[in-house]
Amino acid sequence: MNEIFPSGALSAEAPPATAQPDGARRPLGPASWYARPAARHWTAPPAPTAAHAFHAALPDYAPTRLVELPPLAAELGVGRVFVKDESSRLGLPAFKALGASWALHRVLAERGGATAGATGAAEPADAGAGAAGADVAAGPAGVGDGVAAGPAGAGAGAAEPVTFVTATDGNHGRAVARIARLLGQRAHVFVSRGVHPEAVAAIEGEGARVTRVAGPYDLAVREAARAVEDAGDGPGAGSGSGREASPTVLVQDSGRPGYERIPGWIVEGYATLFAEIDAQLAAAGAGTPDLVAVPVGVGSLAQAAVTHYRAPAPDTGAGAGAGPALLAVEPEAAACVLESLRRGERVSVATGDTAMAGLNCGTPSSLAWPALRAGLDAAVAVSEVAGARAVRDLAALGVPSGPCGAASLAGVRAALTGEGAADRRAALGLGSTATLVLLSTEGPAANPHGQETSAHGQDTSAHGQSPEPHGSDANAYSQTPDPHGPGTHPEA
């Protein structure tokens, strides 16, 4: 699934998304909505399943709850609505620990960790998601208390501790820091501008070294990669060189050409979430969902959704066609996947301020992009007001959600209600008996942005703006093309 896209400026600009007072009811313009119903008939390669068995063997593992919310079904005019509540996952308030734990396990196993059953088999440094998943023991042999003793490499006799380097909008960095600490390893986390101070403090509380970056997520990604290169470990450090591997490893959830193997492991880890949903829907007598709404940053979780729901049926081997519609949801301030889908190529966008800090990403992952382009039915960009309303409404229904997690509800409201809703429902293939699954990817503790809201939805926290530069200066870094990524599309 590796794909390289040329750098360089785009020859034409799409109109910027128009700000509206209420994303749940406003008409969706061409810059805020994309649909491609043919995606349902694309078949993805089978995905590895070893990560699910690995997670299930952890003493602290338990499936997160899937909550049915009849009031939302009535509001949206569908049969059933379920919300996957990721407010508590392996002791952290977001789903990211699934990817981080599996990726760190794989890295340390290849370094010759003592975990029984892990082959440590190397593969080409450019391999994509799933290339060697079946070669690793499904269960974390030697497990003691919690995750700490689970993944490979945590045993006695380990060499110099590994420093896992990553960039984050909040949740991924904390997950890497937590798993590294439990394994007796180190973490160095580059934090982008706009991450709430409480989220930064939580990362530091895991014992990680934190470097604050006075710019957006894309700049933090480049700074993290540069730190690994400056350590003499190269852009592909940790990608499979056995016992002689470098003690500094880049563990990023965003792929780029030449660095897609570790992001692929992270995507494999996310697959556990969808395996849980399958079992939980079956237990509820709901069967296969008709639509799954996924909050999107760089697109790694959406890639996991596509590879799960577009893979051949395990029993018959039949291709896709009867699977759910997949809806990507992004903030208007950072709709890089939506813009890429509209243009038909992976592009970067300049990002602004948003309470949905974990989705504030300007460039889709190069590893995720081919799957997103082929397998997403639709994408929608939502306003800050719509997102804040979704947070409040989910809380009132008993689901604690942060702004990123609540984006799913804001997205389905934008898609299924308001002017033009009939056409959008038709594009998604949804009738009055449809079953919807909304992924609430984080709890309020993961991302405190937007929690101080007035009764009218005004965010009194200014979307968590940090003391770093804002306004025209805030987007200056986004205007600089990423040497590892596609051309930049500066927004007005």
Image: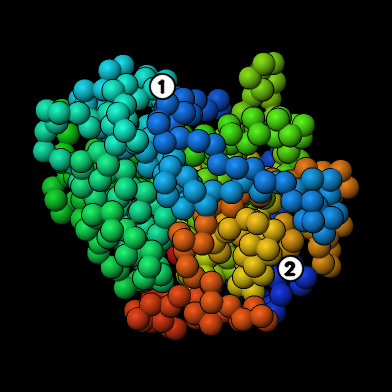
How many numbered callouts? 2
Q: Up-down: is 435 above or below 453?
A: above
Residue 254 shows in this picture: no
Q: Type of residue at label 2? A: Ala
Residue sitting at 62 percent across and 65 percent down?
Answer: 391
Given residues 12 and 417, the one toward you in this image is 417
Q: Does residue 172 appear left or right of residue 270 in this picture?
A: left
Residue sitting at 40 percent across and 31 percent down?
Answer: 59
Secondary structure at numbered mark 2? loop
Q: Type of residue at label 1? A: Ala
Given residues 383 and 174, the one toward you in this image is 174
Are discs 1 and 2 less than 8 Å apart at CB? Answer: no
Residue 469, percent from left and from top? 36, 81
**Residue receiving disc 2:** 24
Residue sitting at 61 percent across and 81 percent down?
Answer: 454
Q: Quadrant of residue 249?
A: top left
Given residues 235 and 15, the one toward you in this image is 235
Q: Viewer-nearest of labels 1 and 2? A: 1
Q: Does residue 45 appear left or right of residue 421 in this picture?
A: left
Question: Which of pointers 1 and 2 lies earlier in the amino acid sequence?
Answer: 2
Q: Does residue 260 appear left or right of residue 324 in this picture?
A: left
Q: CA distance from mark 1 to mark 2?
A: 43 Å
Question: Is the residue marked by circle 1 packed among few (<14), some (14-19), or many (20+) residues within 10 Å?
Answer: some
Given residues 296 and 339, the one toward you in this image is 296
Q: Up-down: is 286 above or below 462?
A: above
Residue 201, percent from left and from top? 32, 65
**Residue receiving disc 1:** 138
Residue sitting at 43 percent across and 78 percent down?
Answer: 465
Residue 142, percent from left and from top? 28, 23
Q: Quadrant of residue 33?
A: bottom right
Residue 252, percent from left and from top? 35, 48
